[in-house]
Image: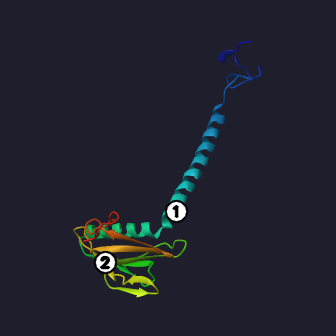
Amino acid sequence: MRVAFSDVGAGDGVKAGRVHGAPGFTLLEILLVLTLIALLGSVMIGGAASLLKSSKEQDPESALLALLQKTRGEAVEKNQVVELVQQADEQGFLVSTGGVEVLPKAEGGSRVTLLRAEFSGASLIGGQLEERPLERIRFYPDGSCDPMRVQVRRGEVRRVYAIDPWTAAPLPEGGKAR
């Protein structure tokens, strides 16, 4: 039996223009599935974004390099010299424009230190060569900064990066900040 849309009646066993048992989905079913997909997608995207953010925040090296770029940008934007001063705890930095930035603590107790561009002022302490950290770094309105190196110490592992004074970005291995 074939039922035309115009032949649909209230008592024929046919609902809303469709023969009972005909293949296909109703609009309500489709909207329900799309709503569930959107809900699950938003939960998954939000979870992935927070996971990526938390993994970034746990790396003091990346946080310091981002802080150097941010401070450089402030100096250019405000057209004034901006100073970055390392606090005694070696995790926090004061910015002369009025902010305090605290680097995240990584597992294993890493320390981040700003050093002079050239190796100097070192002492032998407990069989380890220790350099005196820089007290402050100046960033200038032209986008340059004082020459420096960044030392990251995780336990017994020590890495030193030379920082380009023109871009405040790390130089490739073996590069010198001048």
State how many labels appear: 2
Q: Residues within 10 Å of mark 1 (few under 14, many from 20)?
A: few
Tell me the quarter of the image containing the C terminus: bottom left
Q: On the image, numbered disc 2 is attached to which residue?
A: 137
Task: Name, please, the residue furthest toward the left.
Answer: 142
Asked if residue 62 is positioned above or below residue 92 in the image, the reply reads: above
Task: Name, please, the residue furthest toward the front.
Answer: 127
- Which residue is nearer to you in this view: 160 or 90? 160
- Which residue is nearer to you in this view: 36 or 3? 36
Residue at 67% x, 22% y is 17
Q: Position of residue 124 (x, y in %)?
A: 40, 86
**What is the distance, in whole Å, between disc 1 and disc 2 at their CAs?**
27 Å
Q: Is 134 left or right of 154, judged from the image as shown?
A: left
Chain-order first, disc 1 or disc 2 = 1
Q: Is residue 98 visible?
A: no
Helix, strand or loop status at disc 2: strand
Q: On the image, numbered disc 1 is attached to which residue?
A: 55
Q: Amino acid at mark 1?
A: Ser
Asked if residue 123 is positioned above or below residue 60 in the image, the reply reads: below
Q: Is 44 left or right of 74, judged from the image as shown?
A: right
Q: Is residue 135 visible?
A: yes
Residue at 59% x, 52% y is 43
Q: Position of residue 8 (x, y in %)?
A: 70, 19
Determine the image quadrant of residue 150.
bottom left
Determine the image quadrant of residue 34.
top right
- Which residue is nearer to you in this view: 20 or 125? 125
Helix, strand or loop status at disc 1: helix
Q: Position of residue 127 (x, y in %)?
A: 45, 84
Q: Amino acid at mark 2?
A: Ile
Residue at 65% x, 18% y is 5
Residue at 31% x, 79% y is 119
